Image: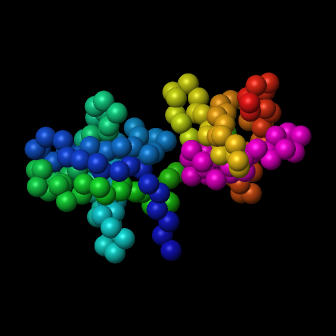
Amino acid sequence: MQKWFNVGKIVNTQGIKGEVRVISTTDFPQQRYAKGNMLFIFTNQNEKPVPVKVASHRVHKNFDLLTFEGLHTINDVEKFKGSILKVPEEQLGELDEGEYYYHEIIGCQVISEDGLEIGKIKEIISTGANDVWVISREGEKDVLIPYIEDVVLQIDTEHKKIIIHPMEGLLS
């Protein structure tokens, strides 16, 4: 069974030359949207994904703007509005030591170094300097922790567990 991973959502068209406006959900937009890269458009659950090859990529405001080979007009891409762009698992590639995909981190249980269960990671905010993990806690408001060495001590994606050192004031 093929596993697929979201890399973006086509939210609109841009201009009349077949460009689409994408809200990116990938950790590696420059790599995913590189010219010549294969992406797969999922229009709805019943249809087969549409394979497309990236012809161009540029960033405008908060969007990634893409064109695909062979799709040169607004009419060619209009039908893809609201569709999800995905890549197959084998396209993910190997990461360096200490690097993780968002889907590996989201859903992990966060525990303090002294065994206190803090909550589950529900979202990752990319700030540029370092990622910030949003942890949902039962009956309490979410807590934000920076993904930095001083705080994150151990990551076990296989068992979906992360051990942190809650610096003073971090959880309050």
| 81 to the left or right of 75 | right
Classify residue 31 as left or right of residue 61: right
Q: Looking at this view, is 68 or 48 the one in front?
A: 48
Q: Percent from the top left, x then y, of residue 152?
A: 74, 35
Residue at (20%, 52%) from the top-left corner?
69
Name the residue: 50% across, 53% down.
92
Q: Is residue 126 above or below residue 135?
A: above
Q: Residue furthest front?
A: 139
Across and down, in percent, residue 50 comes to: 29, 64
Q: Answer with the quarter of the image where residue 34 lies.
A: top left
Q: Quadrant of residue 49?
A: bottom left
Query: On the image, which quarter does residue 14 sit in?
Result: top left
Identify the residue shown where x is 37% and y is 71%: 45
- Can residue 51 be spotted in the picture? yes
Q: Tell me which residue sits at (12%, 44%) in the image.
A: 17
Q: Is residue 99 left or right of residue 65?
A: right
Membership of 62 in magenta stretch: no
Residue closest to the far right: 114
Q: Position of residue 37 (x, y in %)?
A: 34, 50
In this rendered view, identify the residue nearer to me: 58 or 11. 11
Q: Position of residue 109 (x, y in %)?
A: 72, 50
Q: Which image quadrant: the C terminus?
A: top right
Colour scheme of the rendered structure? rainbow
Q: Which residues are magenta?
A: 100-123
Q: Is residue 103 magenta?
A: yes
Q: How many marks can you see?
A: 0
Residue 101 in sight in this render: no
